[in-house]
Every structure is written in structure tokens, then in C-alpha cells.
Image (cartoon, rainbow, N blue to C red):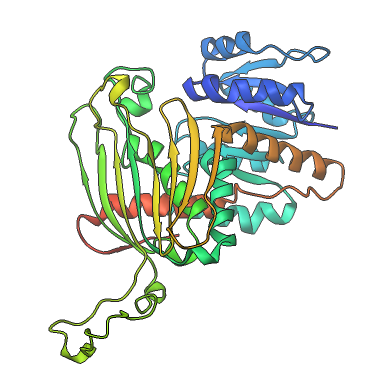
Amino acid sequence: MPANVALLGSGVFAQASYLPALINLSKSNTLNLHTIWSRSESSAQTLHSKYTPPQGSSTPALQYGDDGLAAVLANDEIDAVLFVLPITKQPDLVRRAWKAGKHVLSEKPLGRDVREAKELVEEYEKVYKPKDLIWRVAENYAHEPVLRWAADLLKSTPEAGPILYWDLKFIAFVEDGSKYHATSWRTIPDYQGGFLLDGGVHWTAFLRTVLPPVARPAFVVAFSSLHRAFLLPHDTIQAIALPAPSSTVPPNGPKTKLSSANITESEVPTQPGQSTPRGQVTMSFAKPDLPPSAQTPNGLYITLLNGFFSIESSPTREWVAKFVPAQGSGLEAKEKRSQMEGVEVEIGMFAKAVAAQKEGKESGEQNFGDPRGALWDLGMLEAMLNSNGAETKIEQ
């Protein structure tokens, strides 16, 4: 019996990403979209009119406003709710859903800052998780199959050697007054970072998903800027990411084979370095409006001792992951491509977990939406925003 879910929110992202995913998942009988709710009647009706239920399924109920939300949470037919709402509105509504006994899938980030998010996670773990309520965070990058494949390949190919360093690049153009900018909660954000918080946590989740623990950031040294006045309060971050001190090791491989280089380390005029898998991060929404011919992909670029790994997202929303082995390493080149599908994957995995619990069965579904993981994503973003050139610990 598929889970009955209610979609709470009908904004730009709900229409562009959730709606197609829900249509596909309804067709495959993974879930049943029971109700659509929004804060305003007009936006609820707009999304409702765009949803075409699969043959043999009923049209979702339509609710809006405070009374409509109360009706959704009081409806015993609804097993779970999907929150796609502004950042600062979600935490209190998530709590209301838990109190009503609903399973929850809520959009990233967890809250406006680490303090608020940590309180929410701890409340869930103490009060509602013991009651077997499922809560997952909808971070689609953590669910993208190509990124999971890349992480598995790094883990299963130790011959590629340790990570030496990495580089994360995300730059985007935001048009003043465009559909994403024109929403009131983005135009005048009441949370840190503005677009960087809303969009940047995707890319910290990217790092969490792909990098092995030894290379994952524990501290950052960063600077944030505002280059374009309409993208308050910041639109760009540049950072150096530092792993835990235990990740630093002696230099890799044997010393030189040259017999003429018989100098001892004590004779070197400066102290020889160590090998630390640091990373560089550039995130910016200040990119100019360039023609299609000048567009470049965003992505993560990892240099290993015996190879190079790139995972890129193209302007056409395609993931391309490539491993190129070093010459003479004996390793095999690997490549995987896929259109972005994380939203549908995350909703599907959540719905299957809810359905299994509804039937008293073990889900068997992996959980890539653990709130603790999303808390780290927010923690790294907040650390970069607050660093101002000082080494800052990533709180989680």
C-alpha cells in the first residue's frame, strides 16, 4: 500500500522539481499524492491545476491557509508531509507535523543557522524518533546517483592513492527580478548568506557525499563578499577547507631515485612539508550573464596520487563523473553520466520507507537524508560565512 503524502508548498521549486517527480512516482505507485496545500489560495490552485493524476487515481485534495494546514495535519488518511517552504518558516511547521504524528520530508537547509537547526535535530532524536516517526531532509545532491557512484568509486579504488587536494567551483548568474530572486523571502532575506545559504548547502552536501572522511573539511579559512548590490547580504564565498589534523601524513611514495640527490632532510634550508588533503572552495552568484558558448560547468575536481577525478554539472543539468588514471598506474579510466534526478530519488526513498513502516516491515531503503548530515552541510556554510579570514571550526 503506497504512502499517502501531502505536498506543503507550491512555489517555484515545488512546481519545477517536485511536481514532475510526484507525477512519476504516482505513476509507478510509489506514493499517492493525497493533498496539495499552500499558504495562499491562488498559488495552491496554480500548482493543483498542473498536476495530472495517473489513470485510476483520484485528484488530490486542495487546501490553503492556516485552516487548510490544520485540516491536513488532522487528516488520519495522510501518512506523511513534504515541506517545500521558505527557510525560516519550516522549523516550526515541521514540529507541528511531528506533534500531529506525521512523517516528514523537509527541504534543506534545516534552518536559518546551526543553532536553530541543532535544536530541531536534537528535539527529533529525543522526542519523535523514539516514536518511530521518520524525518528526512530533502537534499537532492546527497541522493544523486552519479555522486553516490563517485563516492563508491573513490572508496573502492585505494590503488588510486590518497587525495592530495581538491577544488570545488560553483558560480551562477542571478538576474535581478528573475523568478527565483523575486520571491519575497529571497529579495529581502531574513537569514544569513542569502542565496549562498539557500543554494550553497547543495555544494557542501556535494562534498559530504563524495569526499571520504579523511579529506572532509573540519575547519575553513574563508572570506565572503557582496559584489552585486541586489543579492543581499553576500553573493560570493572564497575559502580554503582544512581536514582534521589527523589527516596530515608524511609525503607519499619513496624518495627520489637520483643517486646524486643524497642530501639529508636536516640539510634542507626549510622544514620539509607534509601531505594534507586541503581543498579550495569558490561559490558565487555574482557571475555575469554570459552567452551559451562561454558557459562552463560547475563541479568538484579531486587530485589523487595516481589519478584525477572530476564530477561536473553541465548547464543542461547533466552530471558527468570521470576518473582519469595516471599513466603507468595500471588503473582503468571510468565515466558515468546522468541527468539530475535527486529530487525524485529522495522523495521515492522516503515514500518507500513510510510505506514499509505503515505495513510493519523493514524498509531496506538506504537513508541519504539523515538530518545529522544536513546539519554538517549547514555548519560548513555558516563557518565560511563567519570566518572573515580566521580559521573557523565547522560546527555540527
Q: Is residue 234 above or below residue 34?
A: below
What residue is shown at x 33% (from left), y 81% (from top)?
255
Quarter of the picture holding the C terminus:
bottom left
Estimate the x, y position of residue 168 in percent, counting from the top left. Answer: 35, 48
Determine which quarter of the picture holds residue 380: bottom left
On the rendered structure, is 50 left or right of 392? Answer: right
On the rendered structure, is 57 left or right of 276? Answer: right
What residue is shown at x 26% (from left), y 76% (from top)?
273
Q: Is residue 256 above or below residue 210?
A: below
Quarter of the picture holding the N terminus:
top right
Estimate the x, y position of residue 237 in percent, counting from the top left. Answer: 26, 45
Q: Is residue 152 visible?
A: yes
Instruction: Please tell me which residue lies in front, 39 or 19.
Output: 19
Estimate the x, y position of residue 100 in percent, counting from the top left. Answer: 69, 38
On the rendered structure, is 4 left or right of 19? Answer: right
Q: Is residue 121 visible?
A: no
Instruction: Please tell me which residue lies in front, 107 or 69.
Output: 107
Estimate the x, y position of residue 75 in percent, counting from the top left. Answer: 75, 28
Determine which quarter of the picture holds residue 60: top right
